[in-house]
Amino acid sequence: MQKPFQLSTPGPTVVLFIVGASLLPLLLAKGGHADPYTAARLSGPKSSLRLIAAPSGPPGSGYRAGVEINLDPGALTYWRTPGGAGAAPEFSFDGSANVAAITVSYPAPERIVEDGIEAFGYRSHVIFPLRIEPKDPARPVRLALAVSYAVCARLCLPAKGDAKLTFVPGQAGAVADSLDAAALRQADALVPIRLPARERDAKITLVRAAGARLPTWRLSAHGGKALDLFAEAPRGWYFDTRPAGRPNEFLIVEAERPQGGSPRPEVILTVKDEQQSYEFSLDLDAASQPAANANAAPFSTSQPDKVSE
């Protein structure tokens, strides 16, 4: 899912270490060709951070940048929904100028299990793509980034970095095969595409399970090679997901719900696919078909019961 941001004042953030830098704008020679914007890497315990950007495209197309995090061996950082532990990254663009909107995208995560706890995140390396829409395309855009993220390797430490870049209209720097531009294209390819309802219904089948101890659904993904499934729900709700025992099939288990009998909300489901990951919103009750038949793979009830009635 992509998240657009409007400028606002961030709340206080407590950090154990702070990485800070001001990355001066690199202005390209008028009418010439130059490398994309580059920035020095900011080092911190178990990780390093860099703000990268590709040359601007045609006038009015906006600008592309990315928050690149490299992680030490064994360390991880988290997706927008971290799972059973951890903290999602937080991005602030206060101090930016001539910006109408900034959209942060999240590559599909991996499922990481350590000491019996599941986390959704990234090892080794991740780039969060940014798309910047200027208010006035004829004027420069000043991008001011402040990001907080967690890094875990046995111990978890919060990290914080800040950086600035300036984009100048008309200075495109036509090096399409530069390293940073290529890295941003690769990161964009890892971001799940958002499916509208019609495409969603052609890609998946949802069946409500009969006889399961907790409310359970079986999701089948059609086409491609589905590697994993992740579920996101409003605060107070938690839907566990896991393989169902057959290729391209997963179980969705309502493992936690708020007290008070709230109606079941729509969930956001992300299918991580070998070719192209995708995500969509879904009303589990409205979309599910009748209970699975007797020939379906059995439903496991070995997971801890976290439901709070």
Image (cartoon, rainbow, N blue to C red):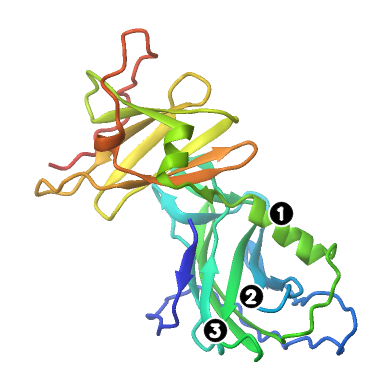
Label 1: which secondary element: helix
Indicate the quadrant where residue 50 lies: bottom right
Residue in the foreground of this view, choosing between 107 and 21: 107
Specify the amino acid type for callout 2.
Gly
Where does label 2 land, which residue? Answer: 62
Specify the amino acid type for callout 1.
Gln
Asked whether, in this view, residue 115 is left or right of residue 29, the answer is left
Label 2: which secondary element: loop
How many angstroms separate mark 1 from mark 3 (CA)? Answer: 25 Å
Specify the amino acid type for callout 3.
Val
Q: Residue, x 12% and y 48% (percent of image)?
A: 259
The 10 Å Cα crowd at callout 1, few under 14, some 14 to 19, many 20 or more, is some
Going from N to C along the chain, the mark reached first, 2 or 1, is 2
Task: State the image coordinates of residue 230 (x, y, percent, origin top left).
Answer: 44, 42
How many angstroms separate mark 3 from mark 2 (CA)? Answer: 10 Å
Label 3: which secondary element: strand
Quarter that holds the C terminus: top left
Q: Residue, x 24% and y 39% (percent of image)?
A: 306
39 shown above or below 105: below
Asked whether, in this view, residue 259 is left or right of residue 123, the answer is left
Asked if residue 36 shows in the view, the reply is yes
